[in-house]
Image: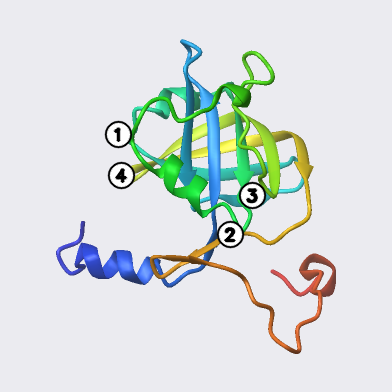
Amino acid sequence: MNGDLDARVLRDVFGLFATGVTVVTGRKASGEPVGVTANSFSSVSLAPPLVLWCLQRESTSLDAFAVGRAFAVHVLRLEQEHEAMHFARRAAGKFPQQAFAAPGAPPLVEGALCRLDCAVEAQHPGGDHTIIVGRVTRLASGAGEPLVFQGGVFGRFAPLPRARHVEAWETFSGDWF
């Protein structure tokens, strides 16, 4: 880390950016299920449908997300703070038996706002993390509010009183360089 930056201050500044909360699940080559809480999730591309997320380089779950392996991103609902904390801990046995509906598939996190089934397209080094790029192969979504994380606390998104739906890609088409 650059000597001019204090790690705690940098972490606090990063925390000013509100994010959604996801649980990413997969399976190691041995078949062992893994699940991690990640707020580093982002869309990358619509064509092809790509997403990315980051996992600590020293994570014991990293091999479950090798190129070609299947994984699932579960965007958590407002009511799923417990699941976010459960999958944030380093421990084995994170999954109840009912999470294994499809043999070999990434485990299911029940009640998520949406699930994106993906295949790892690439891994890239990113400092103390690995950037994992996945191609979306299937998705499912439901109704509800997303769980949001900002400033070290969980919460909810509250639209501005004057808010209106903005379709950014259509509204600003041609204005991007």
Earlier residue among tags 3 and 1: 3
Earlier residue among tags 1 and 4: 1
| Label 1 close to label 4 by CB (< 8 Å) | yes
| Residue closest to the far left | 3
Q: Amino acid at mark 3?
A: Val
- Mark 3 vs mark 1, foreground winner is 1
Tell me where residue 1 appears, x and y as whole percent.
21, 56
Q: Which residue lies at the image location 56% right of the left edge and 44% below the top edge?
A: 52
The CA span between labels 1 and 2 is: 27 Å
Q: Amino acid at mark 4?
A: Asp
Task: Please state if 170 lies on the left or on the right of 107 as rendered.
Answer: right
Tell me where residue 66 appears, x and y as whole percent.
49, 24
Earlier residue among tags 2 and 4: 4
Q: Which residue is mark 2?
A: 147
Q: Which residue lies at the image location 61% right of the left edge and 40% below the top edge?
A: 73
Q: Which residue is mark 4?
A: 128
